[in-house]
Image: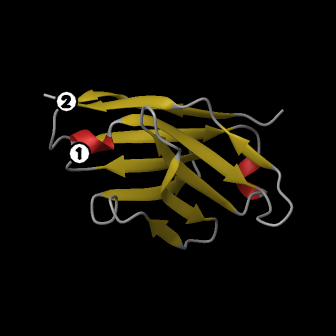
Amino acid sequence: QVQLVESGGGLVQPGGSLRLSCAASGNLLSSINNIGWYRQAPGTQRELVARIIVGGEKEYSDSAGGRFTVSIDRDKNTVDLQMYKLKPEDTGVYYCEAVVNPSRGPIYWGQGTQVTVSS
């Protein structure tokens, strides 16, 4: 059974940093096309923050560019999102999404981890 488990969320002051991890079960990382990190703030739709194509290509939202870095740790079997210079508007539940095939799926989601940026 495929599982994605996010961790690393918490409460941080503005300007602080957090590192989120998305742990993938089994050999999922060897069978997927890409993994994305999404954020969902209360009352809003889930939005893409960063995506990494297995093989290296990365993309970031305008709000994340220059502050967030997405990477794959093959030793730990995780996809990590390093976040710097956090702002209150970065607050939300962060989810990782694994896409096996962009045209046909399947797509898997984790349960999310809460990030709160507040003084």
Amino acid under disc 2: Ser
Depicted 104 relative to depicted 55: above or below: above
Q: Residues within 10 Å of mark 2 (few under 14, many from 20)?
A: some
Quadrant of residue 92 within the rendered picture? top left
On-image quarter of the C terminus = top left
Q: Position of residue 8 (x, y in %)?
A: 41, 32
Q: Amino acid at mark 1?
A: Leu
Residue nearest the observer in this picture, 7 or 38:
38
Q: Position of residue 90 (x, y in %)?
A: 31, 43
Residue 108 point in image, percent of width and height: 73, 43
Q: Sequence order check: which comes first, mark 2 or mark 1?
A: 1
Which residue sits at x=79%, y=37%?
2
Q: Nearer the viewer, residue 40 or 94?
A: 40
Q: What label sits on residue 118 in the rendered view? A: 2
Looking at the rendered structure, the secondary structure element under dot 1 is: loop
Q: Position of residue 70 (x, y in %)?
A: 45, 57
Circles 2 and 1: CB atoms closer than 8 Å: no
How far is disc 2 from disc 1 in space, using C-alphas? 9 Å
Query: Is 12 left, or right, of 65 in this rendering?
Result: left
Q: Which residue has dot 1 on it?
A: 86
